[in-house]
Image (cartoon, rainbow, N blue to C red):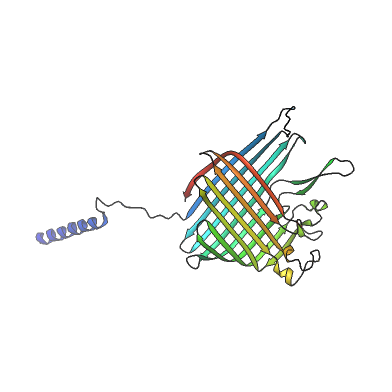
Amino acid sequence: MKANYFYILLFVLFSNLLQAQEVSPPANVIETKKDTSYWVKTLKTGFNVNQLYFTDNWKGGGTNNVNYLFYLLATANYKKDKISFDNSLDVQYGSAYLKTNEQFRKTNDRLLLDSKLGYKLSKNWNAFASFNLLTQFDAGYNYKKDEITNQEVTTRISGLFAPAYLTETFGAEYKPVDYWFLRLGLAALKQTIVSDTSIFENVPTRYGLKAGKKSRNEFGLLNISSGFNKNIAKNVNLKILYQMFFNNYSYFFEPIETYPKNMIEAYIDQRFDVTVTFKVNKYISSQFNYVGLYDFDQDKNYQAAQSISLGVAISLPESKK
């Protein structure tokens, strides 16, 4: 009987030993934790300042001025299996002080938010739904000289969410590489919002809104956007964004009375943004910005603006979380 107890005890001890050997990894094997970081985040920000000074007897001519530019670019992108969710925030604000008028006047003002939910269909193609918001932070003014008094007249023509443009798009995206994409919107909605209608006194077109209205809806079957963001040299980054919205529903079915007849370009809004960043060293960089815009609801002619600045830049390392 005692022998039976001995064999039972020996069996239990042997079983526990085998279980311990199966659970414990070999001494020369290092366990690695599975990567569950599906979010990738980046942040770049900077503050640039330029200054020009001339003495009163400077024969070459010129005006004393100081101008600055603050910018911030943040991204938060999620990717797991066939699902992706890309978000970017582009903020710019700058102004210049001229001795001739002794006041600051803004030179850059942009708030651009873009979000895209994608589903991978094949190696280079995705189905997507996107949301885009474009507006400015500060009031914008038009400066003109009165023909009679020859005095400068200042009129306010824009402000925060005055106007603001919201665009929702559904379609297909072609993205063969990480730094370039082409989105073909097969159905798109666009809202123009003017939160402060008092500016209509100085904007005859009312940004395309009807009298007494604060918003306008547009529907299009063709909306194209394309983006490029890559370091084209060791210390040079090139970023390009092109956006096009075609209000083809109005063009074909409900022509707008205030638009010239058969003028298809009046129904097509286009915007072209270019940013070139030259990195001098870890903290010093120079930036060139160009914006080209055509929107018949704002002006019948093409609009353009550009700026060059030098200053401090901070770039946080890419993080996964």
Q: Which residue lies furthest to the bottom in this view?
A: 253
The residue lying toward the viewer, choosing from 19 and 318, is 318
The residue lying toward the viewer, choosing from 18 and 110, is 110
Is 276 above or below relative to 51? below
Q: How many marks?
A: 0
Q: In this view, does 197 lie to the left or right of 229?
A: right
Which of the 4 quarters of the picture holds residue 258?
bottom right
Residue drawn 67% across and 53% down?
Answer: 292
Q: Residue furthest right?
A: 148
List x then y, in percent, for residue 282.
Answer: 50, 39
List x then y, in percent, for residue 9.
Answer: 16, 58
Which of the 4 quarters of the picture holds residue 226?
bottom right
List x then y, in percent, for residue 32.
Answer: 34, 52
Residue drawn 55% across and 61% down?
Answer: 117
Quadrant (top left, top right, bottom left, bottom right) of the N terminus: bottom left
Residue drawn 52% across and 43% down?
Answer: 315
